Amino acid sequence: MAKNTPARGSQVPDFTRPALAPGLLSAVILMATVALLDNDLYFIVRFIVSILVAIMAVFAVKAEKPLWLIGLVPVVLFYNPIFPLPTWPFTIDPGILFIITMTVPLFLAAAGVFIKVRDETDRRSGGSRR
């Protein structure tokens, strides 16, 4: 048996999940900072979440999964700290804002799991990029 062939059952998948880390990280940040909804520090949370979800949107485009953009783009716009939507141009009830903040992490975690990008490494040449 050749040394370069993988053992039975140890097949390496031909895809990666690059949106998993930003999806889970933004979900954890949103759920951990629910207490800051009425605080000025929530501005920083909005920056971080908006950037991470924008990164996920780029990976969704790269993975050729444009349907995930239907949910990712509104999340980027909703948590955008430059033009904050919950206070501009209209006001959102704090109870509804709490519900949104608790349900968006579920969507972000699901998007992180299901956005798969084809792996571009060449397995025969030892893992170098094409």
Image (cartoon, helix red, strand yellow):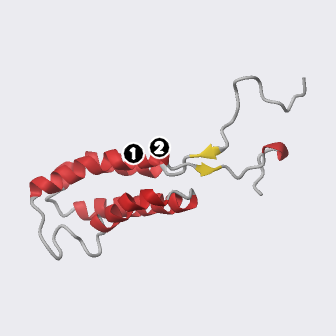
What SS does tag 1 mark?
helix
Q: Which residue in the rendered view is the most extreme toward the front?
A: 67
Residue for point 70% across, 31% down: 11
Which picture quadrant has residue 49? bottom left
In this rendered view, identify the residue nearer to me: 16 or 38.
Answer: 16
Q: Is residue 23 above or below residue 53?
A: above
Q: Is residue 96 left or right of residue 72?
A: left
Q: Is residue 1 above or below residue 14?
A: above
Whole-percent x, y for residue 112 in the image: 45, 48
Q: Is residue 95 above or below residue 50?
A: above
Q: Residues within 10 Å of mark 1 (few under 14, many from 20)?
A: many
Residue 113 badge: 2
In this rendered view, identify the residue nearer to me: 128 or 109.
Answer: 109
What SS does tag 2 mark?
helix
In this rendered view, identify the residue nearer to me: 61 or 47.
Answer: 61
In this rendered view, identify the residue nearer to me: 58 or 40.
Answer: 58
Whole-percent x, y for residue 92 in the image: 12, 64
Amino acid carrying mark 1 in the image? Ala
The residue labelled by disc 1 is 109
Whole-percent x, y for residue 129 in the image: 75, 55
Residue for point 31% across, 68% down: 77
Q: Quadrant of the C terminus?
A: bottom right
Whole-percent x, y for residue 58 in the image: 50, 63
Q: Is residue 24 visible?
A: no
**Mark 2 and 1 residues: CB-CB less than 8 Å, in contact?**
yes
Q: Which residue in the rendered view is the most extreme toward the right?
A: 2
Residue 4 badge: none
Residue for point 52% across, 58% down: 59
Q: Is residue 31 visible?
A: yes
Q: Is residue 47 left or right of residue 111?
A: left
